[in-house]
Image (cartoon, grey):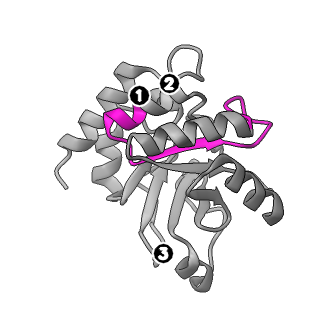
Amino acid sequence: MCGITSARDAAMAAEAGADFIGMILWPKSKRSVSITVAKEISDVAREHGAIPVAVFVDEDAKTILRTSAASNTEYVQEKRVIYVLHADEDGSLLNHISEEDCSLADWILVDSAMGGSGKGFNWSKFKKPPVRSKHGWLLAGGINPENVQVALSALSPDGVDVSSGICGSDGIQKDRLRISSLMNAVKSHPS
């Protein structure tokens, strides 16, 4: 689960069964957190058995390494480790990854062109590129408790990345019922 903005939300997501807890360290995001809050979220995620992930946008390697160390995150989402590919509304990829870079990445994340907006893309038209990352690929973009089973059935990703789809009415704080509904839908999906 991504876009986590508090230790409380991290605990709620991890207790519901989230494997990864993502926090955004890009100041232009409405869900951006400070390094101090990111460290608190990381600590809580680890206490509950989840892996903390720091999300960056167009940041230099030195800043990523410094911030990741200070916030005690396990993975970073930028252009490496978790490499992000974007799909337009019709499901066509807008960027690509070389085979060499793909083999270096831990995960490939496919998101809509408007990442972080809660908007998806046409899953039925999407053609997944060959992914040879270390762990597989994750799907993001417009996923919520009501459609996660459709997404899993249509594309068979190795996991999903959800943020807006589990938010409360303020669009920032996570909603316990939506998290629980999402996790129940994921767990009940035939693998």
Q: Residue at x 56, y 60 (%)?
A: 92
Dot 1 and dot 2 residues touching (CB under 8 Å): yes
Q: Residue at x 41, y 33 (%)?
A: 13
Question: Which of the two marks, 3 or 1, is nearer to us in this view?
Answer: 1
Image quarter for residue 40? top right
Q: Which residue is drawn at 57% across and 84% down?
A: 99
Image quarter for residue 87? bottom right
Marks 2 and 3, the one that precedes in the sequence: 2
Quarter of the C terminus within the rendering: bottom left
Mark 2–mark 3 Cα distance, whole angstroms, equals 32 Å
Residue of label 2: 8
Disc 2 on helix, strand or loop?
helix
Q: Is residue 174 above or below residue 142?
A: above
On screen, residue 34 versus residue 145, left or right, reads right
Residue type highlighted by circle 1: Met
- Where's residue 98, x and y in %? 62, 81
Q: In this view, does 8 lie above or below 135?
A: above
Residue nearest the observer in this picture, 47 or 103: 47
Residue type highlighted by circle 2: Arg
Q: How crowded is mark 2: few (under 14 residues within 10 Å), some or many (20 or more)?
A: some
- Where's residue 127, x and y in %? 45, 66
Disc 3 on helix, strand or loop?
loop
Residue range in magenta is: 12-34
Residue of label 3: 133
Mark 1–mark 2 Cα distance, whole angstroms, equals 6 Å
The answer to whether residue 112 of the structure is visible from this angle is: no
Residue of label 1: 12
On screen, residue 6 versus residue 47, left or right, reads right
Q: How crowded is mark 3: few (under 14 residues within 10 Å), some or many (20 or more)?
A: many
Q: Is residue 94 magenta?
A: no
